[in-house]
Amino acid sequence: MTEIAFHFNAPDKLAYACRFARKVSRADVRLAITGPQDQLDQLDRMLWAMASTDFVAHCRGDADEEMCKVSPVILVPDAGSAPHSEVLLNLGAGVPAAFSRFGKLIEVVSSQDEADRQAARERWRHYAARGYAIVRHDLVLKGG
């Protein structure tokens, strides 16, 4: 069964996603990041901006098939299209399609956006109603 963790109180969800991508790629774990296309576009730019100090190898889901297979981090609007199923990080408001094929799902929740927080509560209820054990990580307590 997929391990689900909610990472609450992210001051900046995209900056957090960059740090998370760096951390898991250093651990040789493959990561798919899903969310709205405009957020994925911005995240792609942010990951490339990190290249001078902390390169995170990544590609977009519309890259050629071979690149998608070898990239440790992939940005996909539809989680079901990811070529691997180790870890999924969700930036979107809804429950990601095909999340249950991943070993681990990370839900990132804003510290300030009340609509995002409410959507997270709905996702939490969805997973809990289906019997998933949920781990809660408060990023304020961890230092972000």
Image (spheres, rainbow, N blue to C red):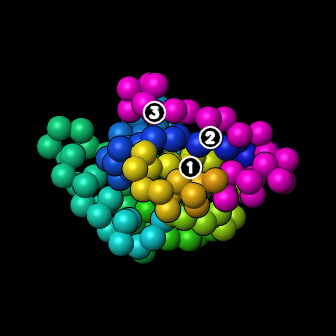
As drawn, is 77 to the left or to the right of 127?
A: left
Q: Position of residue 49 (x, y in %)?
A: 18, 52
Looking at the image, residue 10 lies above or below residue 81: above
Single out the mark in the foreground, 1 or 3: 3
Looking at the image, residue 10 lies above or below residue 95: above
Question: What's the mark number on residue 36?
Answer: none
Q: Say if residue 28 shows up in the picture.
A: no
- Label 1 CA crowd tier, 10 Å (few <14, some 14–19, many 20+): many
Question: What's the mark number on residue 139?
Answer: 3
Earlier in the chain: of badge 1 and badge 2, it is 2
Name the residue type under label 2: Ala
As drawn, is 126 to the left or to the right of 36?
A: right
Is residue 140 in the magenta section? Answer: yes
CB atoms at circles 1 and 2 under 8 Å apart? yes
Name the residue type under label 3: Leu
Residue that label 1 marks: 107
- Label 2 CA crowd tier, 10 Å (few <14, some 14–19, many 20+): some
Label 1 – label 2 distance at C-alpha: 6 Å
Looking at the image, residue 106 lies above or below residue 80: above
| Residue depicted at 77% across the width and 39% down the height | 133
Q: Which residues are magenta?
A: 122-144
Which element type, helix, strand or loop, lies under badge 1? Answer: strand
In this view, the residue in front, 45 or 112, is 112
Earlier in the chain: of badge 2 and badge 3, it is 2
Earlier in the chain: of badge 1 and badge 3, it is 1
Quadrant of the rendered image containing residue 120: bottom right
Q: Quadrant of the N terminus?
A: top right
Question: What's the mark number on residue 5?
Answer: 2
Residue situated furthest top in the rendering: 142
Q: Say if residue 10 shows up in the picture.
A: yes
Number of labelled discs? 3
